[in-house]
Image (tube, rainbow, N blue to C red):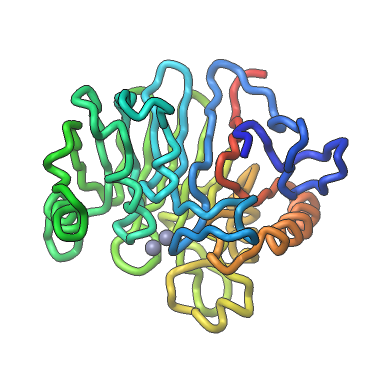
Amino acid sequence: MSATNSNLVACDEGHPIGSLHLNCDTNTVSSVGESGLTVTFHGVRGSTACHDPQTHRYGGNTSCVSVSSANESPIIFDLGTGLRYMNSSQDEAKPKPFVGACLLTHLHWDHIQGLPFFRPLLCEETVLNVYAPKQEDGRSLREIFLKKICPPIFPISLNEFKATINFHEVGDDDFMIGNTKVISRFVPHTGPTLGFRVTVGGSTVTYLSDHQQPTSGFAITTGARQLCQGTDLLIHDSQYTPAEFELKPDWGHSTLEFAMWVAETTSSKRLALFHHDPSRTDDALDVIAQRLAGVAKNRGFEVFAAADGMTVEVGGVV
Ligand SMILES: [Zn+2]
Ligand SMILES: [Zn+2]
């Protein structure tokens, strides 16, 4: 899939506003200047990777999104299977090194499974700084990763990769990565889970991939509100329909409607529907995105359904 399509605009091919543009030349919705951010979705699926004819357009890779801006090292949200498609080199013999940071929301499989398949880890020059939530049982992040990426689960230990991987334990913190301002806050899910807000210049992106909505009524924690308030782009868990949520009220996720409410109540400018349920077909997402685009317009923001390979420009001087 082209990495330049955006689904926020109407096109000459007749694709509805809010749905995915396929095989047409529609480009990103906004021009972006030097201080803007480029957000690329490498994996948008929740829970488990999937691959079948009914999900191939929006994509089946699990959570991974990168943010890049001029003069700053790239930042990756989560290390799901989509990570394999970031920074990928066509030349198998020459993997490209990577120097940057990962803001990891939590340690569920769908958010870390791409790490040992990230080819830059084969390069000595690669330095990956992983910022992830402190664990309640006191185990260090390195200890947990070494237990997940080692024989017989994986052919080699994480320690055997040539790259340098540094782990940083964070919680409700404000910190800088280069000139990027980062806010991390614990959010409701299952187990210790963070959401992140990154700001470069005047451009802000918020990432709340896995977010448990309240089981009765809509409400938002103080921390989640601090992450979302007035953001330029809110990437938010939208795994369930209301009917599905009734069956899985405590599985740690949000409905599409709750994601819409969070965007509206925090005056977010754009909402990316994210962490799509593995059972959600492309056709169903087209219908959802088209319906919600109309609703969002009336509420003063924009919404679209994220897809693997999609690039969105945020902020900057036009
Ligand atoms: Zn997840
Ligand atoms: Zn999770």
Instruction: Give the left or right position of residue 230, taking residue 297 as reference.
Output: left
x and y percentages locating residue 32 in the rendered image:
63, 22
Instruction: Give the left or right position of residue 216, taking residue 137 as reference.
Output: right
Q: Residue at x 54, y 79 (%)?
A: 216
User: Where, quadrant-wise, is the N terminus in this rendering?
Assistant: top right
Instruction: Give the left or right position of residue 303, taking residue 175 as reference.
Output: right
Q: Is residue 75 above or below residue 110?
A: above
Residue 12, quarter of the rendered image: top right
User: Where, quadrant-wise, is the C terminus in this rendering?
Assistant: top right
Front position in the image: 69 or 180:
69
Q: Residue at x 78, y 59 (%)?
A: 291
Instruction: Give the left or right position of residue 103, taking residue 306 as reference.
Output: left
Front position in the image: 117 or 234:
117
Residue 2, quarter of the rendered image: top right
x and y percentages locating residue 213 in the rendered image:
50, 69
x and y percentages locating residue 197 in the rendered image:
44, 42
Front position in the image: 64 or 175:
64
x and y percentages locating residue 72 in the rendered image:
39, 21
Residue furthest out toward the bottom: 247
User: In this orientation, does residue 189 appear?
Assistant: yes
Q: Residue at x 71, y 47 (%)?
A: 20
User: In this orientation, does residue 176 appear?
Assistant: no
Q: Is residue 107 above or below residue 244?
A: above
Give ligand 2's quarter of the image: bottom left
- Count of marks overlaid on the render: 0
Q: Residue at x 26, y 41 (%)?
A: 130
